[in-house]
Amino acid sequence: MSEVSRIIDELSREHDGDPWHGSPLLHILEGLSASHAAAHPIAGAHSIWEILLHVTAWKKEVRRRLAGAEAALPQDGDWPPVGEATEQRWREARVRLQEAHGGLTRALRDFPEEKLLEPTNDKRDRSIGSGVSYYVLLHGIVQHDVYHAAQIAILKKGLSL
């Protein structure tokens, strides 16, 4: 198995597969209504919905970087606004997450293995995770998603669901 295939496997496991660490993100999101997702059960913490939009935005940004774009904050923003918390908009947010995940894994399937250790097209800026190799960038998005999935799991427990 190639390293690109292993990274795709890790992305798939954390998103909707069978990860070693526990439940995948999509499993954690099951059973949440728009009002649950928009709630702030922990004062000062982001809502589940805000975190979902953040994860989606960063998956899209990593895909952009794989295509050779210079690093930047995600085009939708680092923490995109939720807006009106309706069931329709909550469904749409989850669909956009799926689309971003699918787009990233498709882009990675076409990514040349020999480029993994090359630096991305940018200078080091820790605030946007730039100036690293593609290998570090890709493992970083897996770590990012697992981190935020854990936050969502804790927020869900705080809602007593």
Image: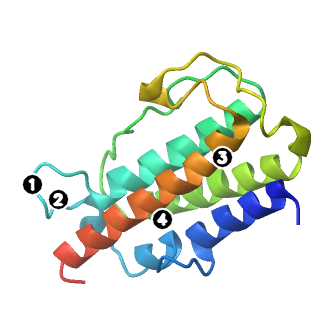
Identify the residue under disc 4: 91
**Rendered-image quadrant of the N terminus:** bottom right
Alpha carbon separation for disc pair 3 and 1: 32 Å
Name the residue tied to disc 1: 43
Residue 128 rendering spot, x and y as whole percentages: 48, 28
Q: Please state the horizontal and vertical placement of residue 29, each as a whole percent of the image.
A: 42, 73
Which secondary structure lies at badge 4? Answer: helix
* Residue 59 or residue 114, whichever sits in front: 114
Nearer to the camera, 79 or 72: 72
| Residue at 63% across, 72% down | 13
Q: Nearer the viewer, mark 1 or mark 2?
A: 1
Determine if residue 21 is in view: yes
* Secondary structure at numbered mark 2: loop
Q: Nearer the viewer, mark 3 or mark 1?
A: 3
Residue picked out by circle 2:
40
- Disc 4 residue type? Arg
Q: CA distance from mark 1 to mark 2?
A: 6 Å
Residue 111 lies in what quarter of the image? top right
What amino acid is found at the position of numbered circle 2 in the picture?
A: His
Q: CA distance from mark 3 to mark 2?
A: 30 Å
First of labels 4, 2 by sequence position: 2
- Which residue has dot 3 on it? 138
Judged left or right of residue 107, residue 76 is left
- Residue 112 in view here: no
Q: Which one is earlier in the sequence, the residue at label 3 or at label 1?
A: 1
Task: Specify which label sits upstream in the sequence, 3 or 2.
Answer: 2
